[in-house]
Image: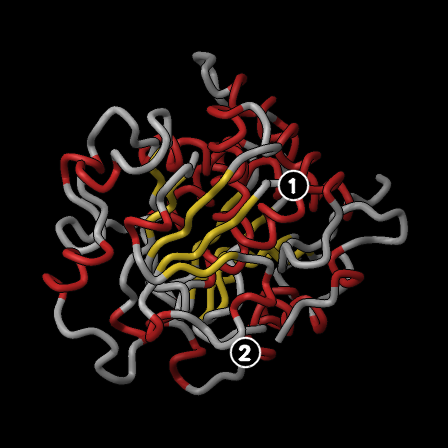
Amino acid sequence: MLANKNLQLNSLGKLQHFLSIEGLQKSLLTEILDTAESFADMSEQQVKKFPLLRGKTIVNLFFENSTRTRATFELAATRLSADILSMNIATSATSKGESLLDTIRNLEAMQVDMFVVRHSLSGAAHFIAENAAPRISVINAGDGQHEHPTQAMLDMFTIRRVKQSFSGLRIAIVGDILHSRVARSQIHALNILGAEEVRVIAPKTLLPAQVESLGVSVYHDLTVGLKNVDVIIMLRLQKERMNSALLPSESEYFKCFGLSDDKLKIANKDAMVMHPGPINRGVEISSSVADGPQSVILQQVTNGIAVRMAVMSMAMQCNMRTE
């Protein structure tokens, strides 16, 4: 299910929910990046808390396991001075048979202000945004195989910080495109922001049907696809989402599609290496590359805090009521 872009914006065209990157304007994505830049600079100060969301309550609704995304959302909310409630779904009433809508209604009754939602079903965050009270903002922290917009935006932020501009850039996204909500969001964002070319490199079994319609060039050979590339984004093999044997073996996959030092040399000399995590070392990327000088993987994690601060503050400001 694709999020209705109009649902994400208020009557003034400002961000109210952040559910999907598809269909958004370049100006809005640039505003998110610029706002994140201000938070990134301020985060280098000794005192890292800002009072923008003081008195507001943000609920983390994570129906899927997550460490990196959940932790950075919690830290971002804390730095904005919001109160944060992280639901343990495994022990919540939802696990006892309560419907998703009943859970939302009960949380609304506690006068919360924002839901950060991660769910295994595509469109779950959109469904909640459609049914939540008008005063509540909803942020999609990953829904099924649909999108993961804040991850894509922190990746865009990282690229812009290193490369300065998207103009003229060739970006390769390598690996399990079929099951990756991150890849879909990245492709939309890169095309909106004006990258020269977005390539996807993967075996045929790990590509969605008609992937070219997303605005990408398709490669099945890593050594060919990495030529003249400025940014390499490696993706994790999402074995938990694979219903059949799509690959012969992990070792064979690394041999053909894993990023090693030798394969990295095929790309441009200053090519940056990215990975949304968690990393499977020796499966999609070697340790020497992941920890090497061209890797910005840890910077991505750091940048995730500033980007999520930006998204939460922009959406919440949109819903601020006049006192």
Note whether residue 49 is visible: no
Residue type at mark 2 is Leu
Q: Is residue 156 above or below residue 212?
A: above
The image position of residue 106, as x and y in percent, is 59, 71
Q: Residues within 10 Å of mark 1 (few under 14, many from 20)?
A: some
Q: In this view, which residue lies farthest toward the bottom?
A: 97
- Name the residue: 49% across, 83% down: 98
Mark in front: 2 vs 1: 1
The image position of residue 205, as x and y in percent, is 33, 75
* 32 and 84: which is toward the camera: 32
Q: In this view, which residue lies farthest toward the top?
A: 46
- Residue 250 placement: quadrant: bottom left
Is 307 positioned to the left or the right of 127 in the image? left
Q: How many numbered marks are there?
A: 2
Q: Is residue 78 above or below residue 89?
A: above
* 217 and 316: which is toward the camera: 217
* 207 and 229: which is toward the camera: 229
- Name the residue: 14% across, 35% down: 288
Is 228 positioned to the left or the right of 188 in the image? left
Q: Secondary structure at mark 1?
A: helix
Q: Which sits earlier in the primary sequence, circle 2 or circle 1?
A: 2
Gap in angstroms between the C-alphas marked 2 and 1: 35 Å
The image position of residue 322, as x and y in percent, is 86, 41
- Name the residue: 31% across, 67% down: 203
The image position of residue 133, as x and y in percent, is 74, 65
Residue beneath disc 2: 100
Q: Secondary structure at mark 2?
A: helix
Q: In this view, which residue lies farthest toward the left?
A: 251
Residue 193's disc is 1
Residue type at mark 1 is Leu
